[in-house]
Amino acid sequence: MKRFIHKFLNYVEIEKNYSHYTIISYQKDLLDFKNFIGEQRLEDVTYLVLRKFLAHLKEKNYSKRTIARKLASLRSFFKFLCREGYLKNNPASALLTPKLDKKLPLFLTEEEVVALIEATSEDNVWGRRDRAILETLYSTGMRVGELVGLNTENIDFFGSVTKVSGKGKKERMLPIGEKALSSIRHYLEALPKKQKEKSRALFKNKKMTRLSDESIRRIVDKYINLASKDKGISPHTLRHSFATHLLNRGADLRSVQELLGHANLSTTQIYTHITTQRLKEAYEKAHPRAKGR
C-alpha cells in the first residue's frame, strides 16, 4: 500500500497541483488507514473493512469533521486506484459522509480587531513587522499560508493590490488597504539594509528567512494575550472577521467569495448565517412585538 500512497501523492501534487498542506493531510490520513489494515492487501479491502475503520475512528473520539476528512481522503485514493487500473472495484463508493454539525466561524467585532492591532508596538522592526502582519491578514482576508508565501515584489504599493498563491497554487489579485500598506512600508524601512536581500520573503524572522505558519500563529497569540482577548482566536479568525465585516457593510456574497478564493459559493455562504443572526438579534431587540410582548 505504501507504493500506491506514493503514486497517489505524486498525482495530487503534480497533476492536481494541490497545496503542500493538502498533500500532508492526505498522507497522514492514508498512513492512518495503512496502519489500521496492517498487512492486508488493498485488493482485499472491502466496504466492511472501511466501515470498521470508521468505527475505529469513532472509538478513538475523533470529531465528525476529522472523520469526514479522512473519509474524503480514502474516497479520492480509491477513485484514483480504480481509474489507473490498480483496482477493479471501489470499496469506498458506497460510504456515506457523516452529517456535520453547522459550526459558525468565530470572528471579532470591528472594535476588537482595532484593539488587537493596536496592541502591537512600532518601537522596533519586529513590532512593525507584527503590526504589518495583522493589518495584512485583516485587510485582505488571505489565508495564513498565502501570507507566509508573500514576497516583497508581490505588493503593488501604487496599485494597492497584492498577488497571492492560494489553494491548488491558483494565483489571484487582492486589494489591500492603505493602513496595511502603510504598516508594510514602515516595517520594510526598519529592516537592516544589508539583510534585506537575504530572502525575497516579505515577512522575515530574525535570521532574515521566511516566517513559518507556526510563527504567524505565535505572533497572533502574543497580541491576543496583550489585548486580553478570549482564547480560541487564531490567524484564521481575522479571515472570518474580514468576510463578516464586509457582508455587514453591504458587500455582495459573490465578491466576498472571489476575495476569499473560495471555489464554491456554498463555502462562502456560512458567513450569511452570521449576518442573518445579527439582523435577527437587532430585530428582536428593537421591534415591540418581535417576542409577543
Image: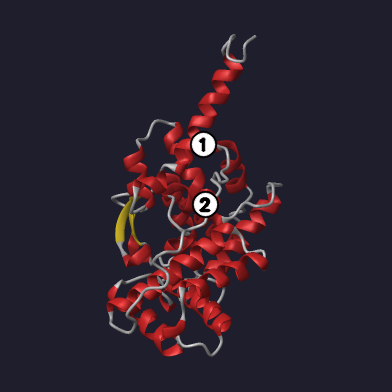
Instruction: Give the residue at x 43% y 31%.
Output: 249
How crowded pointer 1 is (Cα within 10 Å; few <14, some 14-19, many 20+) is rated as some
User: In the picture shown, does residue 37 fall above or below 70?
Assistant: below
* Residue 17 placement, left or right of 236: left
Q: Position of residue 293 (x, y in %)?
A: 65, 9
| Residue corresponding to mark 1 | 274
Using the rendered image of the protein, determine whether residue 18 is visible from the camera's viewpoint.
yes
Pick the quarter of the image with the N terminus: bottom left
Q: Residue at horizontal 60%, vertical 67%?
A: 55
1 or 2: mark nearer the eye: 2
Q: Earlier in the sequence, mark 1 or mark 2?
A: 2
| Relative vertical location of residue 63 with respect to residue 102 in this rendering, above or below | below
Q: Is residue 209 visible?
A: no
Q: Tell me, what colour scheme is on the image?
A: secondary structure
Kindly identify the amino acid type of the residue bearing the numbered disc 2.
Answer: Lys
User: Quadrant of the rendered structure where residue 163 is?
Assistant: bottom left
Q: Secondary structure at mark 2?
A: loop
**Where does the image place residue 41, in percent across and percent down from the top left?**
46, 88
Q: Position of residue 207 (x, y in %)?
A: 54, 77
Q: Which residue is mark 2?
A: 99
What amino acid is found at the position of numbered circle 1 in the picture? Ile
Q: Circle 1 sits in a helix, a strand or a loop, which is it?
A: helix
Tell me the tag on residue 113: none
192 up-or-down from 136: above or below: below
| Foreground pick, 186 / 168 | 168
